[in-house]
Image (cartoon, rainbow, N blue to C red):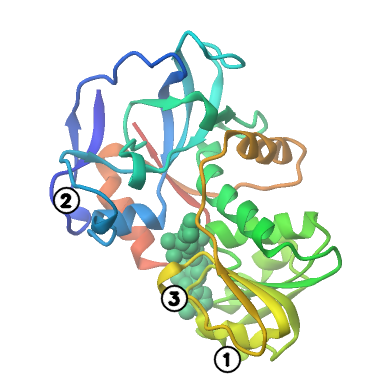
Amino acid sequence: MRAVVLTTYGGPEQLEVADLPEPAVPDPDGVLIRTAAAAVNPVDLQTRAGLHSAHGAFHPPMVLGWDLAGTVIEVGDRVTGLGVGDRVVAMSAQMATGRGTYAETVALPSGIVAPAPVSVPLTAAAGLPLAGLTAWQALDALALPEGATLLVTGAVGSVGGLAVQLARLRGLTVVAHVRSVEDIELARALGAARVVVGEDASALPAGAVDGLLETAGLPRAVAAVRDGGRVVSVVPTRVPEAERGVQVAVSYVEQDGEGLAALGALVDRGELELRSAKELGFEEAGEAHRLLEAGGVRGKLLLLP
Ligand SMILES: NC(=O)c1ccc[n+]([C@@H]2O[C@H](COP(=O)([O-])OP(=O)(O)OC[C@H]3O[C@@H](n4cnc5c(N)ncnc54)[C@H](OP(=O)(O)O)[C@@H]3O)[C@@H](O)[C@H]2O)c1
C-alpha cells in the first residue's frame, strides 16, 4: 500500500510516498480501514521535525497522521457494531502507538473508531477527530457552568473553531481571540458573542472572563481571566502561569470512539460545522506541511491517497 513516510526527522521535504506492506489482518478487536482522507495537524509537523522524539523510539519508515476518515474493509472476530462497508472516522494517537493515518490502509482498535457523520463528504469528516476531541475534552476539563464567559484563543483555528461552537452548545458566552480583522466575521459565524483582535494577548480585557481555553500559545492571555477563574491550555510548551488564584491545567487529547460518535452526531444535527481548506494528494504532503507551518490556513488541510 502507498503511505507518506518519514525516514529522517527534518523539514517538509523529508516526507515521501513509499510502498509499505499492507497492514496485517486485524486482531479480534481491530478493524482495517481504507483511507478516504487523513487531515494534517500541528502535531504531525512537530513529530516530523523531531520535537517529540523523546516520547518514543524512531523506527523508520514512520507513518505520520492522527486523523482518519475511511471505509471499513475488514473486522476482527470480536468486533460488534462495525461492519465491512461502514464509513468511519478515528483519532489515532500516532505519537504513542506508531499507528499513522497518512496511509492507504490503516489497522486500528475498534474502540477508537466511530461512524462518520453522513451530512458531510467523507473526506471532510477527517477534520473532526483530533481537533474535535481536543476541544471537547478541554471544555470538559474547564467544567465551566452554563452562563459562564469563556475566552478562546486561536478561535478560528482547528481546535479553537470547534471549541467556540461546542462552548456555545454548552451554554457558555464565548469571547473569541483572533489574529486579524479578517477573522472577525468567521469568529462571529462560529458563535462568538465578542471578538478581540491582536497578535498577542494585550488587547484582551483584564479579568473579564471566567475561563480561558488557550489554543494559540499565548500564555499572557491568562490576564483576561478573573481572580479564581480557570484556564485549560492545549499548548504544553507555552502554559500560562497560575496567578491570582486562577487554576491552570493542560489537557492532552485522548482516543475516544464514543466521544467521537457524539461529535459526529452534532455535525449531522447541524450543530457543529466542519471547515475544509484544501484537499491534496499524498505526493503533496510536504506542501500541506509547508502551508500549515506558514499559518493563515482557515479549515483543515486534507491528504487523499
Ligand atoms: N494538547 C493536545 O492534546 C493538543 C491537541 C491538538 C492540538 N494541540 C495544539 O493546539 C494548538 C492549536 O492546534 P490547531 O490544530 O487548532 O492549530 P491551528 O489550526 O493552526 O490553529 C491555531 C490558531 O492560533 C492562531 N494563532 C497562532 N498564534 C497567534 C497569535 N500570536 N495571535 C493570534 N492568533 C494566533 C492561528 O492563526 P494563524 O493561522 O494566523 O497563525 C490559528 O488560527 C497547536 O499548538 C497544537 O499542537 C494540542
Pair 2/3: label in front: 3
Give the amino acid type for the residue marked by disc 2 in the picture: Gln
Q: Which residue is mark 3?
A: 238
In the figure, is residue 65 to the left or right of 155?
A: left
Q: Secondary structure at mark 1?
A: helix
The location of residue 67, given as percent across then percent down, is 45, 41
Give neighbour class at mark 3: few <14, some 14-19, many 20+ (Cα, 10 Å): some
Q: Which residue is mark 2?
A: 14
Spot the residue most to the top. 77
In the figure, is residue 235 to the left or right of 5?
A: right
Q: How far is the residue under mark 3 from the one under mark 1?
A: 16 Å
The location of residue 115, given as percent across then percent down, is 61, 27
Q: Is mark 3 within 8 Å of ligand 1?
A: no
Which comes sooner in the sequence, label 1 or label 2?
A: 2
Residue under the image location 54 percent in, 86 percent down: 220
Q: Which residue is mark 1?
A: 202
Quadrant of the rendered structure where residue 224 is? bottom right
- Residue 275 seen: no
Which is nearer the eye, 146 or 274? 146
In the figure, is residue 290 to the left or right of 177?
A: left
State whether residue 49 is above or below residue 224: above
Q: How far is the residue under mark 2 from the one under mark 3?
A: 27 Å
Give neighbour class at mark 2: few <14, some 14-19, many 20+ (Cα, 10 Å): some
Give the amino acid type for the residue marked by disc 1 in the picture: Ser
Quadrant of the rendered structure where residue 1 is? top left
- Residue 171 seen: yes
Residue under the image location 34 percent in, 39 percent down: 97
Answer whether labels 2 and 3 touch (C-beta < 8 Å): no
Residue under the image location 17 percent in, 55 percent down: 9
- The mark tally for this picture is 3
Which is nearer the eye, 59 or 173? 59
Q: Secondary structure at mark 3?
A: helix
